[in-house]
Amino acid sequence: MATDLNKPETQEKPIKNIQPNIGLEKDSMKKANELLNAYLADLHVLYIKTRKYHWNVAGPSFKEYHEFFEEQYKQLEEFIDLVAERIRTLGGRPLATMGDFIKETSLEEDHSGEVKTHDMFERLLADHEQLARELREDVATCDDDLDDAGTADFLTGLMEEHEKMAWMLRKYLS
């Protein structure tokens, strides 16, 4: 089929980034997304650490510990997706590179080679408890400073999950 050379080509309109109109100030959404991205970075570091321990756990209770760590990293995987979706809901962009995660995390990477099983549990416990404390502060910030009850509620649920995961880790150590 011949095209009409005199007729201008139809150009697609550029995609507009339509910002959410959900009753939150633009600055509040920006600050909430900064909190969420920092937490997303923490989740990725904790996920990798948990996965590392899943692969490297050893000893008489290997199967039980291996499966326990798998349950935990799968749960963290779900959190990662939920947090990224919340960031998009608030008009932001989730961090998406390992470099960004390492730069933004408050957690320590585990660079050690062989780790004793007891130490694996202690390190994960410390990380979950740290995240619970940080999330508690973020909930207050979202509620009090940003007037963002939705994100505060979202983070409260995640904080409770980290508290439960920490409780389970503590039970293995007791």
Image (spheres, rainbow, N blue to C red):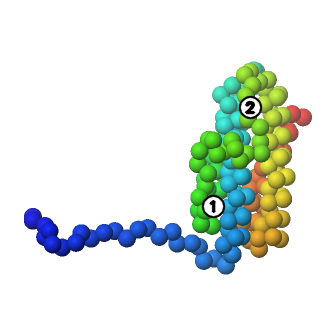
Element class at badge 1: helix
Q: Quadrant of residue 12?
A: bottom left
At label 2, counting other C-alpha atoms closer than 10 Å, the crowd grade (few under 14, some 14-19, many 20 or more) is some
Task: Name above or below for residue 39 compared with residue 17.
Answer: above
Is 130 above or below relative to 117?
below
Name the amino acid type tagged 1. Ile
Residue drawn where x is 69% and y is 41% of the image: 102
For the image, the number of numbered tags is 2
Farthest residue in the left direction?
Answer: 1
| Residue that label 1 marks | 87
Query: Of marks 2 and 1, which one's residue comes earlier in the chain?
Result: 1
In the displayed structure, 102 sits above or below 56; it is: below
Outermost residue to the right? 174
**Residue at image point 9% right, 64% down:** 1
Q: Nearer the viewer, residue 70 or 12?
A: 12
- Contact (CB < 8 A) between labels 2 and 1? no
In terms of secondary structure, where does tag 2 sit?
A: loop
Image point 73% across, 28% down: which residue? 111
Q: Is residue 96 left or right of residue 110?
A: left
Look at label 2 and name its amino acid: Asp
- Splitting the image into 4 quarters, where does residue 68 fall? top right
Residue 135, percent across and down? Answer: 80, 56
Q: CA distance from mark 2 to mark 1?
A: 27 Å
Query: Relative to 79, is 131 on the left or the right?
Result: right
Residue 13 as seen in the image, left or right of residue 131: left
**Which residue is label 2 attached to?**
110
- Let me know if residue 67 appears in the view: no
